[in-house]
Image: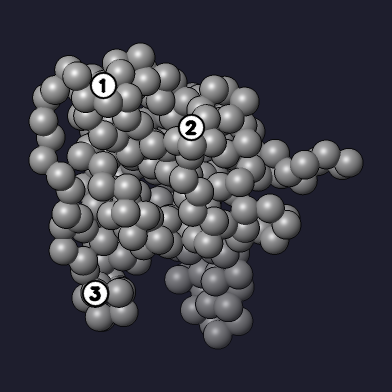
Amino acid sequence: MSLVLAGVLRWVRWRRCSRVVVALGLALFLLAGSGLLPMFLLQRLQAPYVARPAPAWAPDNAIVLLTSGAVPVPDEPVEPGFAAYGRIVQAATMYRDCASAARRCTVLVTGGDPSLLGTPLAVTYGAVLQRLGVPVADLTLESRSRNTWQNAQFSRPLLQALGAQRIWLVTSGFHLQRGLLYFAHFGIHPTPVRADYLAATFSLWPSASNLVLTDLALHEYAGIARYHVYNALGWNAPQSAALDVAPVVDDASAPK
């Protein structure tokens, strides 16, 4: 992008500006490739969620699992993407802990089919969760959403119907800040639980993995900035009142 902009500036005879743009683009490339930029960006996104919260289960709980893409496999059903399994395992682990504590727990998997693979993400992830021991009766699948904003928007009526006393949000550490922002807009205030943690590594030679991490982090910052801009312009859906949930009663005899 910086090279295109530099070319345009040079074409309109703004050669000094063109050189500045090229220099800035090169500097950003080196900072990103070396790992310094993604280290800074990811630390600010993930730091508040490094420690996973203690599983203080209510009698009735909802674990919301945000999906993260899927891949088509030749002659096989669609499978979750490689980055998704940490989220799935975390949700399944939490469900097992909740069940062991004799509490009721529902896993709400939210994700449609944005890549048009023929199977909603919620269905794909739900199948893996079942193989990990989550029964169908304790799975709720939201299969219309195409992005994180719609994950929050379409989860609200389902959570309201479930009537859970405590809501947990499971996603990648770098994704939690944006996810919580969007869910709060729709009156949902869950307990955040990171499924994974990303770390850049310093390299004297630009690293492709550091560039990928920079792209992931910038996508999150762009989504957060867009939310605030859209709010200021009145383009977002109206904010919802806080989700009406039942009070938490610490009752060891609560039904499973």
Looking at the picture, which amino acid does disc 2 mark? Arg
Taking the image as shown, residue 251 lies to the left or right of residue 221, namely left
Secondary structure state at the residue bearing disc 1: loop
Left or right, 173 with respect to 232, comes to: right
The answer to whether one can see residue 181 in this image is no
Mark 1: amino acid: Pro
Q: Residue at x 33, y 60 (%)?
A: 157
The CA span between labels 3 and 1 is: 32 Å
- Quarter of the figure that contains the C terminus: top left
Q: Nearer the viewer, residue 69 or 38?
A: 69
Judged left or right of residue 18, residue 163 is left
Q: Residues within 10 Å of mark 3 (few under 14, many from 20)?
A: few
Per the image, the residue denoted by label 2 is 87
For discs 2 and 1, the disc positioned in front in the rendered view: 1
Quadrant holding the N terminus: bottom right
Would residue 130 be seen by someone viewing this image from the given angle?
yes
Determine contact: label 2, label 1, CB under 8 Å.
Answer: no
User: Which is nearer the N-term, disc 3 or disc 1?
Assistant: 1
Considering depth in this image, is 199 or 243 the residue closer to the camera?
A: 243
On the picture, is 99 further left or further right than 241? right
Q: Which residue is mark 3?
A: 238
Quick one: 115 or 91, which is closer to the camera?
A: 91
Residue for badge 1: 55
**Alpha carbons under labels 3 and 2: distance apart:** 30 Å
* Dots 3, 2 in contact, CB < 8 A: no
Indicate which disc, 2 or 1, sits on the residue closer to the N terminus. 1
